[in-house]
Image (tube, helix red, strand yellow):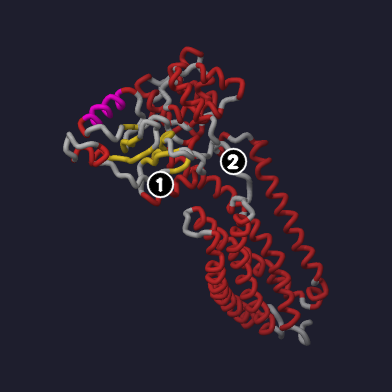
């Protein structure tokens, strides 16, 4: 294979098979391959490492920071984990083993145990020299210096701007900020991302229940988290299980399995639509014209419900909406649903009357049919909006991910109830004429 530059390989990487990726990487120049390897996802790094000889594998795995190495170790098979851990130096191996004790989606599993630490009794000059030595030895990134007591409890934080601006003989205890924003090592990674975004931090310290500092979560780690969480939520909103691997790398059987479950459930739900229509079989037989508007009716309710669900789930993900806000949301969505229903009702009414005038499509009772469709749209769109906005709250209250309230699921729910509303309105409006 022709030797590729990192830019060329980066461009074609998504469309290459795993054997092709391994071969292409092995043909890269060393100057390019280091940076390229560190930019890859943990899954891709794991595949490349397992394809290497042991001696070569040792060189590459030792390039990884402890938190990145822990991600790779979690992705290899249990039989390979001890072998990969054995390639690390003793210090890194202990750090990685400690990280593996945390849940993968917790702050402890996300953090880097290598951070800049200083003591409160140090002078500013002493702290700067000490930080220079740390940076040369093992620090992955330096955003802030964390002030720890002898028992490694977090007492304060000092920025490098403050360090260089302060008098050299001044003790750190007089320079540091004691109102430190930190997160527990057991906190969910999505919550960590929200805290960092709220306080606009480049890094955030992670502490245990006793206040001992365990590591830091940096902004580049959070970017990966946000991307993964957003991808997972979008896939769930589409009415399927989230994929664990990139689309083109997901085996076909796994793809079908993750999509078939929800699709089957939605299909069974839609069968209730046939049951609802059979309940009103006599009405349809008497007024066949009503059947013409069934797709219009059920799609309008489903679309309004899907809109509301998507808005609320995203607002929950961003922390804009809490469980206790359900009453405020209900009031807003009732008003929104009525407004949207009136808009669609007006459009439907005008369309039916114009079509009747132009083509005589709906018979002598066209005005009554138009009124039935318009009133039904108001009720169905309002109900769909209300159901779509409240379902994420019910799912969150039950302890599940609100993204499970997928748009297709809401649409299926509203389809069935929409038919009941439509034919119930028809029975009232068309009684004595068509019915």
In the rendered image, residue 7, in percent from the top left (x then y), is placed at 38, 31
Q: Which mark is residue 243?
A: 2
Say what secondary structure mark 2 lies in. Answer: loop
Asked if the residue at tag 1 contacts the one at tag 2, i.e. Cβ–Cβ closer than 8 Å, the answer is no
Q: Residue at x 51, y 14 (%)?
A: 53
For mark 1, does the 10 Å Cα neighbourhood hold few (<14), some (14 to 19), or many (20 or more) residues? many
**Which quarter of the figure has residue 166?**
top left
Say what secondary structure mark 1 lies in. Answer: helix
Q: Which of 289/67 is in front? A: 67
> How far apart, in angstroms, are the residues tagged by discs 2 and 1?
26 Å
297 horizontally vs 431: left or right: left
Q: Residue at x 45, y 19 (%)?
A: 26
Q: Is residue 200 above or below residue 288?
A: above
For mark 2, does the 10 Å Cα neighbourhood hold few (<14), some (14 to 19), or many (20 or more) residues? some
Q: Which of 366/150 is in front? A: 150
Q: Which residue is mark 1?
A: 196
Of the 4 image quadrants, the one containing the C terminus is bottom right
Q: Residue at x 27, y 33 (%)?
A: 121
- The magenta span reads 126-136
């Amino acid at each position: 294979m022709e030797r590729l530059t990192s830019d060329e390989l980066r461009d074609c990487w998504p469309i290459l098979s795993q054997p092709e990726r391994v071969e292409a990487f092995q043909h890269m120049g060393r100057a390019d391959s280091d940076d390229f390897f560190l930019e890859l996802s943990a899954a891709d790094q794991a595949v490349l490492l397992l394809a290497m000889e042991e001696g070569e594998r040792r060189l590459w795995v030792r390039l990884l920071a402890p938190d990145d190495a822990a991600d790779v170790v979690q992705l290899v098979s249990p039989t390979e984990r001890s072998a990969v851990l054995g390639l690390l130096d003793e210090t890194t191996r202990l750090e990685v083993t400690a990280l593996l004790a945390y849940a993968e989606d917790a702050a402890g599993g996300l953090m880097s145990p290598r951070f800049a630490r200083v003591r409160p009794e140090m002078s500013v000059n002493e702290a700067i020299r000490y930080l220079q030595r740390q940076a040369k030895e093992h620090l992955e990134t330096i955003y802030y210096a964390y002030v720890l007591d002898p028992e490694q409890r977090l007492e304060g934080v000092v920025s490098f701007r403050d360090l260089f601006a302060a008098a050299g003989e001044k003790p750190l205890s007089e320079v540091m900020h004691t109102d430190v924003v930190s997160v527990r090592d057991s906190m969910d990674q999505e919550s960590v991302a929200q805290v960092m975004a709220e306080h606009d931090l480049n890094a955030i310290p992670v502490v245990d229940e006793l206040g001992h500092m365990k590591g830091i979560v940096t902004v580049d780690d959070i970017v990966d988290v946000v991307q993964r969480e957003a991808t997972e939520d979008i896939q769930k909103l589409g009415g399927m299980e989230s994929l664990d691997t990139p689309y083109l790398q997901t085996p076909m059987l796994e793809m079908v399995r993750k999509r078939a479950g929800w699709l089957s459930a939605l299909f069974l739900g839609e069968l209730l639509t046939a049951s609802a229509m059979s309940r009103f079989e006599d009405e349809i037989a008497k007024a066949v014209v009503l059947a013409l508007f069934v797709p219009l009716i059920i799609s309008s309710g489903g679309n309004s419900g899907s809109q509301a669900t998507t808005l609320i789930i995203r607002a929950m993900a961003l922390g804009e909406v809490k469980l206790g806000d359900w009453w405020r949301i209900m009031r807003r969505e009732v008003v929104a649903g009525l407004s949207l229903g009136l808009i669609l009702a007006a459009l439907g009414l005008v369309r039916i009357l114009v079509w009747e005038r132009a083509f005589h499509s709906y018979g002598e009772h066209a005005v009554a049919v138009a009124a039935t469709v318009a009133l039904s749209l108001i009720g169905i769109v309002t109900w769909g909006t209300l159901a779509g906005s409240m379902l994420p709250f019910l799912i969150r209250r039950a302890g599940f991910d609100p993204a499970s309230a997928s748009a297709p699921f809401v649409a299926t729910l509203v389809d069935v109830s929409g038919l009941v509303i439509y034919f119930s309105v028809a029975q009232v409006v068309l009684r004595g004429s068509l019915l």
